[in-house]
Amino acid sequence: MNPSASSSAFDTIAAIATGSVLSAIGIIRVSGPDTLSVLDRVFRPLSGAPMSERPDRKLILGRLSHPDGAVLDVCLATVSRGPGSYTGEDTAELQCHGSPTVLRAGLEALFAAGARQAKAGEFTRRAFLNGRMDLTQAEAVVDLIDAQTTRAAENAAAQLEGAVTRDTDGIYDTLTAICSHYHAVLDYPDEDIEPFALAGYRDTMEDAAARLLRLKNTFRRGSVLKNGVACAILGRPNVGKSSLLNALLGYDRAIVTSIPGTTRDTIEEKAVLGGVLLRLFDTAGLRETEDPVERMGVQRTRDTAQAAELAIVLLDGSAPLTPEDEAVLEAAKAAEHSILLRSKADLPAAWDRADAIPVSAVTGEGLPALEAAVAALYPPDTSVPVGQLLTNPRQADAVARALEYVRAAMDAMDAGVTPDAVLTEIEGALNALGELSGRVVREDITNGIFARFCVGK
């Protein structure tokens, strides 16, 4: 952590922590050295002492007022004094009625009392700088807010509790012990310290490399968990692709007509099927056409199929298969996985295949079977503890660099080079792991992380 960071280095900030829509309850958060005095200027308990004299984490009913005395709301307030608060500073929350007008007026009252508007992510940034969480935990806050599946929420919640850090801290401490032993022998030759021998650390280095490799290999699954599976809905024109998309989303997102070629551009939406987040791409129908605009859409469809991890292939079950259907099946081979659907199952079937799931966007037939097929392709990875799936490129890059340094150190050991050369590689691994957790603070890294936060978090 930044050793110069402390609550005294910051001013007092305030922000609305809930959304801007009408709701039953809205929350305004305050953090900083003057939190208690600012709160006392705008909030007066209905009975008893001011909030600055109240115990931590106790909800108190009172009046929220502008410093000029105008009452804005009758609401609840609570305080949490640092360093045991979320940010490590004195903090407070006002739990108001959820009128956006009331919340804005309450926030303006706090500004008039001495607070300023918090920037995006500033509360969590202070928590990091004050040692309340590391960078992986800070990123988990965003992942938890953005989670669109139960699995993603579980992984983020475990990371927020330090699952990644617990794993990498053991590696960091092991590598630090090797460096410390070497320097102790070098700096204190007259002390009774066990002689330093690189060979004695070979098994330790191999264990560190294996653990880093295991963690690095979780990134692909973690990325799918967080960002979803790129899924192209493929088929010739008028087979029901847009109808299927609308049925999966639960609302009419795509225009549906009986005119072939209605969809000319790729539409992207997200839906959860079988517990798996899918980034669904409704594509233009694959066929030969003289229309230049539709031809561009068809090419985009082919490009989307090339980039997709999953292809959902729709073939019209009410009509005989055509050469265009065969072209669709061929295009789907570019995806890692594919699921074949026989659409328009509410009409008499003109063909059947054992691997085709009959579906109807009209009646909903086959949609549960489609969900089951998706779930079977992307089952939960029970081999990795919850919370130890890396979910973003920054984390994966830091772990990959640490692994490269450890492997380079092992290669140097095998080559019989001097210990100081080996330790240079080990120190490189320590720096990479330090960037992962935030032990090594880089301003560009922290700025990039906290820029993704919303105001009030």
Image: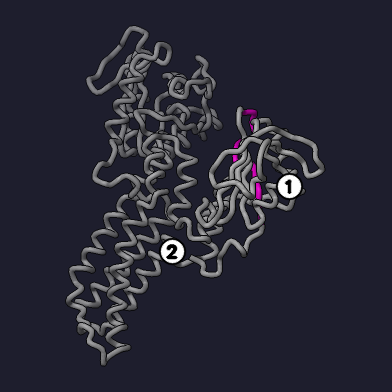
Residue 377, picture quadrant:
top left
**Residue 412 horizontal/vertical position (percent):** 25, 77
As drawn, which residue projects farthest toward the top? 348
Q: In this view, does 117 lie above or below 188?
A: above
- Name which quarter of the figure residue 352 lies in: top left
What is the x, y in percent for residue 275? 36, 31
Residue 180 seen:
yes
Asked whether 155 or 16 is in front, the reply is 16
Secondary structure at numbered mark 1: helix
The answer to which image quadrant residue 188 occupies is bottom left
Mark nearer the viewer, 1 or 2: 1
**Distance from Cα at disc 1 to Cα at disc 2:** 41 Å
Amino acid found under the numbered disc labelled 2: Glu
Residue at which label 1 appears:
41
Q: Any mark on residue 435, and which?
A: 2
Residue drawn 37% across and 9% down? 346
Left or right of 420, for residue 439: right
Q: Please give the range of residues in magenta.
A: 12-23
CB-based contact (under 8 Å), mark 1 and mark 2: no
Q: Is residue 396 left or right of residue 444?
A: left
